[in-house]
Image (cartoon, rainbow, N blue to C red):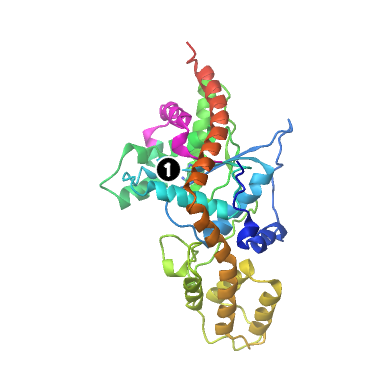
Amino acid sequence: MSFSKFPLWETGGFSYLRRLMNSKEEIAKVPAGKNEAGSKQIVMSGIRPTGFLHLGNYFGAIRNYVRMQEDFECYFMVADLHSLTTHPDTKELKSNVHRVLAENIACGLDPDKAAFYCQSHIYETSELYLYLNMLAYIGELEKTVTFKDKVRQHPENINAGLLTYPVLQTADIILHRAKFVPVGKDQEQHLEMARNFANRFNHRYGEVFPEPVAFNYNQELVKVPSLDGSGKMSKSENQLATLFLADEDDMIRKKVMKAKTDGGPTEANSVKPDYIENIFGLMKLVSTEDVLQKFDADYNNCTIRYGDMKKQLGEDMVNFIAPIRNRVNSILQDEKYLKDVMEKGAEKARVSAQKTMKLVREAMGLTY
Ligand code: TRP
């Protein structure tokens, strides 16, 4: 069966695909997609199935995945086991997993190109996790920032899975002997631990794993500013200042119109305050160059009307988000398709996992 069952053009998503491909951003420090032997380098990343994706996730992460699937051998995984460390109740897990799959596919992730699978479907992960647990010290695990945060937030559920969260994450990555891990800043410590665990394994049992490193095309990840003028868009912070890929058109317009502005500049060519810079920043992501230049010129000669600017931005956001949202909704209605995607992804992931686990058991001498 074809996994390109929801082509982008069916839902009018061509314009954002074109934008994606024509993106003028500097592509800094792109590692060669192939290694010396000529085979593709391996990329692995995990996505937690916790609700709705927003514009920040799109420009910060998904857009990079979509590019990487062309250049690398990619393993993208829905981290459902990790979510058990904080959400032992599994009632909503299935619909959350489905949503994450649908949202990523709607944004251009192609299950025919990347292995897109569910963590719990690959039992080899649990085996490697067990071996790695013997190489992870309690002291270093207790020092992990994310663990300390969770302890503070949920003192009633400090379980061992939470403590060994970085060990499971390491297993996810090195199970495919992946070298490149597209993640944001918040995951840097976990990645450093992954390098430590991989090296420790190699020293004790023999060279099996490459050192995984964080990798994104742009050295500086695109930060999508929040609409309230403070920080970046976030799932948990101010939801009314965050544009979700699931937001309806009127909600998008409403949120954009509420963005913070002021009376406008009084002196020609003055420096833009942060919250105004943010609106221009958002415009840069979804509007045409002409539109952007017009408002920039208006700002510089003090004739800018923020009401008009936000109206324009609202429409451009709607044109950007609506096709994605519509695609998500049609994918979500097709459970059979989602199941097939996961099965096909798991098949690909298992081939790579089983190869690695054979090497692991041999290196450890567990071959009697
Ligand atoms: N911990 C990651 C997060 O919170 C999710 C994740 C799980 C992950 N396994 C991974 C990321 C492997 C990269 C590689 O976002």
Which quadrant of the structure image shows residue 147? Answer: top left
In-front residue for pair 143/30: 30
Magenta stretch?
116-139
* Amino acid type shown at disc 1: Asp
Q: Is residue 176 above or below residue 330?
A: above
Q: Is residue 12 above or below residue 2?
A: below
In the rendered image, is residue 49 in sight? no
Q: Nearer the viewer, residue 117 or 181?
A: 117
Q: Secondary structure at mark 1?
A: helix
- The quarter of the rendered structure image containing the N terminus is top right
> What residue is shown at x 57% (from left), y 37% (from top)?
212
Helix, strand or loop for the magenta stretch, by majority? helix
Residue at 36% x, 42% y is 84
Query: Please, is residue 219 above or below residue 224 in the view?
Result: above
Residue that numbered label 1 is attached to: 80
The residue lying furthest to the left in this view is 156
On the picture, is 50 further left or further right than 358? Answer: left
Residue 185 in percent (x, y) is at 52, 51
